[in-house]
């Protein structure tokens, strides 16, 4: 028996729980060519507890030497969990993942390696190679530390952007009052952006068009409105990485993306609203919609979903995202920039162009933008009108009564016009509307017709509120109490006979019998309580869903660990 084996076995007898002794024994067995015995030691002793990452790293190297790739990766991952800032640990995992075709994990650990140790030439070469196969030439060049390059051609007549052309682009994609983003590629090849507090102007647009910079705009303004929005269709990251060596399949996916974007555009055209398709330079497409006025982002979201509802789902190979200027972030939402068209996609080095039905860029992009038609509020409202609404048309008598009470009560007319213009109503405004219009004939149909244009319109919620109205319409003094800032300047020239034991109310313009002789003061307050209770109930439901989601994630993680442990036992058998 070799001396090293004898010494390692002697140390194990003295200290049987020290993994270093077993590592020494495995190395001694390998030197003697006794691979079977080395495997046995690894299989039985590799999981000895240790807080020293270098021990798990040594186990990983020994597993690699014996061709035990899965066990090697597990050991390296254990080392990473104990010392996440060591680039060599990440690189060893990346090598194993690259060899097995687990491109997503390989990419992740190569990015981490380069971030921790930019001088790691082998990691940079592998990472750049992956980016090239993904079609991300800009990311590859950033990793290879080459200068930024943009596709260019000889130009005898140099392009000069005119101010009116820059103003056109700025006006179409007008967003946040101040501030914009500048995209760039990090040393790991990932895309990032820097927020600038200044105002986006001619100089920045010129640099964007020339390709010197890539600018992103924040579509969402401070008052939560947008002037344009869009639908982005792209290849999901996991699908892209799973087919990194299959350029033909990725080309087919890009073709499917273009056809799906054209389908959205065609369906929007059928609804009499224009959409404009842009090639994002990375196999994706964006379908843009431009509005005449700034509209609430909830209305824009409802508008986009209304169009998507009329086309078939894209399937698992494609992903769809709404461009509204924000992204979900944990529980809340954060403002997020959207890359301005006609610039250079930094990840690929390709320029973004508006394209025709065949996917060919328009010859004169700026001239094309001059032909863009903006969507009016009436067109948006028409899109919101559902086919089933035809089955609940308001009768002629009810329409006359609604018009009558509107004209005679300026407060109510202001609320109705606000709702029909597509803005959300405050709780006080809803209370006044429910406790007046809610007592007219066909009140349910009338209220649906008034509130349907509102971005937060929910039919079931309205029906629920109507069922709780009670029997007491709202009084004029209560209206003034709820909306003092509005009643202060609107004229009130009402003239009606108040029934004995009754009180003044806008419904007296319709029928004095609607006012009870004894007023139950609690009924008027009930609608506010109902509205607030409904909102609190929605918040509680959301928190319960979040708690349930976290619980399920933890349970899945536990079951996954148990499954892996059972698989290891079965393999030993």
Image (tube, grey):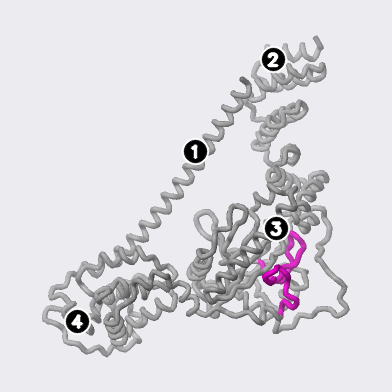
- List the single residue furthest toward the left: 500
Query: Which residue was labeled with disc 4?
Result: 511
Instruction: Say whether marks 2 and 1 touch (CB < 8 Å).
Output: no
Question: Which label is found at residue 12?
Answer: 2
| Kind of element beneath mark 1 | helix
* Residue 419 seen anywhere in this rendered image of the structure: yes
10 Å crowding of disc 2: few (<14), some (14-19), many (20+): some
Dividing the image into 4 quarters, which one contains the N terminus?
Answer: top right
Seen in the picture, residue 434 relative to 21 is either above or below; the reply is below
Sequence-wise, the earlier of marks 1 and 3 is: 3
- Indicate which disc, 4 or 1, sits on the residue closer to the N terminus: 4
Pointer 3 with pointer 4, Cβ within 8 A? no
Residue under numbered circle 3: 191
Disc 1 residue crowd, few under 14, some 14–19, many 20+, Cα 10 Å: few
| Comparing labels 2 and 1, the label whose residue is closer to the camera | 1
Q: Nearer the viewer, residue 463 or 203?
A: 463
> In 3D space, how far apart are the residues under numbered discs 1 and 3 (Cα atoms)?
33 Å
Q: Please give the range of residues in magenta.
A: 339-366
Is there CB contact under 8 Å for labels 1 and 3? no
Q: Secondary structure at mark 4?
A: loop
Query: On the rendered image, what quadrant is the C terminus found in?
Result: top right
Residue at horizontal 83 percent and vertical 69 percent from the top:
152
Determine which residue is flagged by label 1: 555
Q: Nearer the viewer, residue 481 or 554?
A: 554
Give the spatial CA distance, label 3 vs label 4: 66 Å
């Amino acid at each position: 028996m070799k001396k090293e084996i004898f010494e390692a076995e002697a140390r194990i007898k003295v200290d049987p729980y020290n993994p270093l002794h077993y590592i020494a024994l495995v190395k001694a067995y390998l030197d003697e060519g006794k691979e079977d015995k080395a495997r046995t030691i690894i299989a039985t002793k590799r999981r000895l507890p240790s807080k020293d990452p270098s021990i798990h790293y040594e186990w990983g190297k020994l597993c690699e030497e014996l061709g035990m790739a899965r066990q090697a990766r597990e050991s390296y991952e254990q080392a990473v969990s104990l010392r996440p800032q060591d680039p060599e640990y990440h690189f060893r995992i990346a090598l194993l993942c690259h060899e097995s075709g687990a491109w997503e994990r390989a990419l992740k650990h190569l990015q981490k390696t380069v971030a921790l140790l930019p001088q790691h030439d082998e990691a940079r070469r592998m990472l750049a190679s992956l980016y090239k196969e993904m079609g991300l030439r800009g990311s590859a060049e950033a990793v290879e530390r080459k200068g930024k390059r943009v596709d260019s051609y000889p130009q005898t007549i140099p392009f000069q952007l005119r101010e009116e052309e820059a103003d056109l682009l700025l006006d179409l994609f007008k967003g946040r009052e101040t501030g914009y983003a500048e995209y760039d590629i990090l040393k790991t090849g990932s895309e990032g952006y820097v927020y600038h507090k200044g105002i986006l102007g001619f100089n920045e647009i010129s640099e964007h068009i020339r390709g010197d910079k890539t600018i992103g705009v924040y579509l969402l303004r401070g008052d939560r409105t947008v002037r344009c929005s869009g639908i982005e269709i792209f290849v999901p990251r996991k699908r892209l990485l799973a087919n990194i060596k299959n350029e033909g399949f990725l080309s087919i996916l890009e073709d499917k993306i273009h056809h799906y974007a054209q389908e959205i555009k065609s369906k929007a055209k059928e609804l009499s609203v224009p959409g404009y398709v842009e090639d994002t330079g990375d196999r994706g497409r964006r379908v843009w919609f431009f509005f005449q006025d700034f509209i609430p982002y909830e209305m824009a979201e409802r508008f986009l979903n209304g169009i998507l509802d009329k086309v078939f789902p894209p399937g698992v190979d494609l992903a769809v995202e709404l461009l509204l200027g924000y992204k979900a972030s944990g529980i809340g939402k954060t403002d997020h920039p959207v890359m301005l068209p006609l610039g250079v996609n930094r990840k690929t080095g390709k320029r973004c162009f508006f394209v025709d039905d065949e996917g060919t860029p328009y010859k004169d992009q700026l001239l094309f933008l001059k032909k863009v038609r903006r969507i009016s509020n009436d067109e948006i409202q028409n899109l919101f009108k559902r086919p089933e609404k035809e089955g609940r048309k308001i009768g002629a008598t009810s329409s006359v009564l609604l018009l009558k009470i509107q004209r005679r009560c300026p407060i109510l007319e202001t609320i109705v016009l606000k709702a029909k213009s597509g803005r959300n109503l405050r709780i006080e405004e809803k209370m006044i509307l429910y406790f007046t219009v809610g007592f007219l004939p066909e009140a349910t149909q009338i209220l649906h017709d008034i509130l349907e244009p509102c971005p937060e319109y929910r039919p079931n919620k309205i029906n629920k509120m109507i069922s709780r109205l009670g029997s007491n319409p709202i009084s004029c003094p209560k209206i003034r109490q709820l909306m003092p800032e509005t009643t202060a300047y609107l004229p009130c020239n009402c003239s009606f006979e108040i029934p004995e034991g009754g009180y003044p109310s806008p419904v007296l313009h319709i029928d004095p019998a609607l006012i009870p002789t004894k007023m139950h003061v609690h009924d008027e307050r009930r609608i506010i309580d109902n509205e607030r209770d409904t909102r609190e109930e929605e918040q509680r439901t959301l928190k319960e869903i979040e708690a349930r989601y976290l619980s399920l994630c933890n349970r899945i993680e536990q079951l996954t660990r148990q499954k892996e442990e059972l698989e290891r036992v079965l393999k030993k058998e």
